[in-house]
Image (cartoon, rainbow, N blue to C red):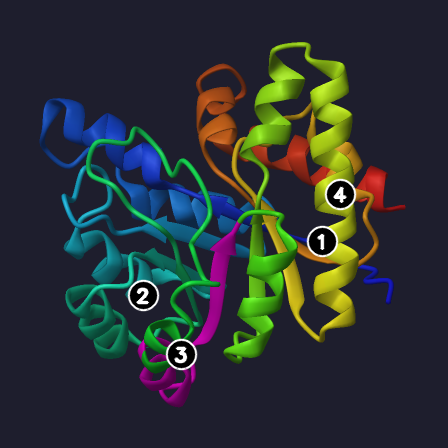
Amino acid sequence: MTLKHLRLGVNIDHVATVRNARGGDVPDPVRAALVAEAAGADGITAHLREDRRHIIDSDIDGLMAALKIPLNFEMAATAEMQAIALRHKPHAVCIVPEKREERTTEGGLEVAGQDNTLAAYMAPLQAAGARVSLFIAADKRQVEASARIGAPVIELHAGAYADAWAEGRWAARDSELSKITDMVAYGTELGLEVHVGHGLTYDSVGPIAALPQVAELNIGHFIIGEAIFRGLGPAIAEMRRLMDEARA
């Protein structure tokens, strides 16, 4: 299966990180999301962490009210987050692992060991109309388990690939790209929609964007950082251009 249009989800978490560093209302993540929408983003991703270190509840309220493009609500598999998602009914819910001591999401969700628990957790979200995705490692066991419990979408964690690229570890980069490539194909074969995210940059996005079965990339930290120098709209437009060029 070859998907012509590769969707770009822009994660606006770190606009909230900058706001929270000083307090107050600026910069506003909702304003950033609207700029991203105007610049060609296909969706907005926001992770409401349990400790509210960046995105806070009022940001989700504002995003749901303001956006015309889909909101992808990232969250841990907790009762609190499930209740928030059911109240807002965002277009998409991405379930991620979460540890309070981590700076950012360090790995994929352990789906293979939680089949019954995760299936029961997903059920009310799916019944409410949310497209549920599971953020997992590019690992065959996790892909198979995601399909087995009825997840329609998986997002493969590209962090190891992106880190190897950034550090010039070319053999490791190629090995990680091979894993992602294989699991994109395998997930598609199992009937899953496959997304990829975490750590992608202008340099590293091309080989991932070129994979014909990938439906969506979610990119945040690099785009928000690049926006300091280019502006948010131009930073997103350049990522969009590179993705389209690679897919073509």
Compare marks 4 and 1 and give the one earlier in the sequence: 1
- Residue 119: which disc? 3
Q: Which circle, 3 or 4, is nearer the viewer? A: 3
Label 4 sits on what residue type?
Ala
Q: Which circle, 3 or 2, is nearer the viewer? A: 3
> Image quarter for residue 76?
bottom left
- Badge 1 element: helix
- Residue 64: which disc? 2
Check contact, mark 3 vs mark 4: CB within 8 A. Answer: no
Q: Which circle, 2 or 1, is nearer the viewer? A: 1
Q: CA distance from mark 4 to mark 1?
A: 14 Å
Q: Which residue is mark 1?
A: 183
> Image quarter for residue 114?
bottom left
Identified at 68% across, 40% down, the residue is 240
- Badge 2 element: helix
Residue 145 in the image: above or below residue 14: below
Q: Which residue is mark 4?
A: 209
Label 3 sits on what residue type?
Ala
Percent of width and height locating residue 77? 28, 63
Residue 21 in sight:
yes
Compare marks 3 and 2 and give the one earlier in the sequence: 2
Percent of width and height locating residue 116? 37, 78
Identified at 16% across, 23% down, the residue is 21
The residue range painted magenta reads 121-136
Residue 41 in sight:
no
